[in-house]
Image (cartoon, helix red, strand yellow):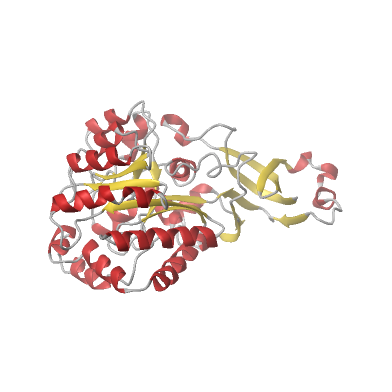
Amino acid sequence: MSLIYNIGRLVGIQPEGVLRLEGPAQGQTGVLENAWLRIKDGRIADYGKMADLVGHDETDAVMPDSDRASIDARGGMVLPGFCDSHTHVVYAGSRDGEFLDKINGLSYEEIAARGGGILNSARHLQQISEEELYNQSISRVREMMAKGTVAMEIKSGYGLSPKAELKILRVIRRIAENVPAAVRSTYLGAHAVGPGYTHEEYVQMVIDLIPEAAELADFVDVFCDEGFFTVEDTDRILTAAKGKLIPKIHANELAVSGGVQVGVKHNALSVDHLERTTDAEIDALKGTETMPTMLPGSSFFLGLPYGRAKDYIKAGLGVALASDYNPGSSPSGDMRFVMAQGCIKMRLTPVEAFNAVTLNSAYAMGLSREYGSITVGKKAALILTEPGWDLTKLAYQYQTPFIREIIL
């Protein structure tokens, strides 16, 4: 048993059974001031106001149990750790040369047409050993954890061949076994057409690899967008994966692609990107179990439109935000910055953005029963801040160090 006491603000409180927040509820969260929180066996056991503790002070509150640790929060805020439901952190090398190409005016599509983009990452990845890939990738995972991320999804997709895709999935599994954060794995064989394949041959290869991928991954994903994979390709792949892998979709980053609708057809857990949205996508998501997930880091880095998160919430939907940490379009896994962009660029309130990077993003990878809120019984995966912080300041002063301790 351990106790955190003298908490200035305990933020992110939700009743048991609340797995996602939609519509007006996305703008609400429970806050308890002058609070304490108990942890038992790695889970949240109880919480309340300091005035309710025995003796009303920290000395009596801690009690003299030899197996009980305690932390004096000294007025700091305690909140659930960030949940990042869309990353590509298992990659090799760097694409900083393409960063210069972007500065010089080349578009994402033009860089890809010259053999850059995903194909460039695939070349790097195929050339290095599995051990080196693991070493490079786990360093990024630890960087994310140090910034407050306690749960993450990691995709394949930079292999573009059966051997290399399975290598990525094995590395993701090894990462999951060696960090305290929760890690979910996604088979994104359909990220781009691999070298040496026709489009049709590659789609068939992706389908044929599903049984082996399903032994290593939780989800299947398709880049359903202009210049990559069509609605028909996506439908075939998700149909083949039915009963083996849970669908997630890349959709509407480069164009309105139909990816949202095909994702809904297959009961996708999430549809991600959504930089390009019409009212038809919003209407298609109403009444479904699918979480719209937006990636403002890509909008920031590529100069794309920001997703219409406010319109989704006004329509009664929930929204998740994720980092899209990858070498080509969002080389950052800082979820606090993602939250800030939700406020600054997408006009979400700090509470709406906070719920988007915690509970709703946990939902978008099937983890909201265990992560994403202050709820009795959930994992004690928490951020303790220095004194003086609240959610508004967290987004407003988005570069000022704020973490005192990650409790994971």
Q: Is residue 140 visible?
A: yes
In-front residue for pair 62/189: 189
In-front residue for pair 157/244: 244
- Image-based side of 37 in relation to 204, left or right: right
Farthest-out residue, top: 287
In-front residue for pair 27/362: 362
**Number of on-image labels:** 0
In-front residue for pair 293/25: 293
Could you tell me which quadrant the C terminus lies in?
bottom right
Vertical position of residue 383 compared to residue 276: above or below: below
Which residue is at 79% across, 42% downward? 53
- Image-based side of 279 in relation to 167, left or right: left
Which residue is at 50% across, 43% downward? 367
Q: Is residue 158 visible?
A: no
Which residue is at 84% across, 50% downward? 63
Which residue is at 68% across, 55% downward? 73
Residue 47, x across and y down, in percent: 69, 41
Residue 1, x across and y down, in percent: 75, 50
- Image-based side of 402 in relation to 89, left or right: right
Vertical position of residue 195 compared to residue 17: above or below: below
- Residue 180 picture quarter: bottom right
Residue 361, x across and y down, in percent: 44, 44
Residue 368, x across and y down, in percent: 51, 40
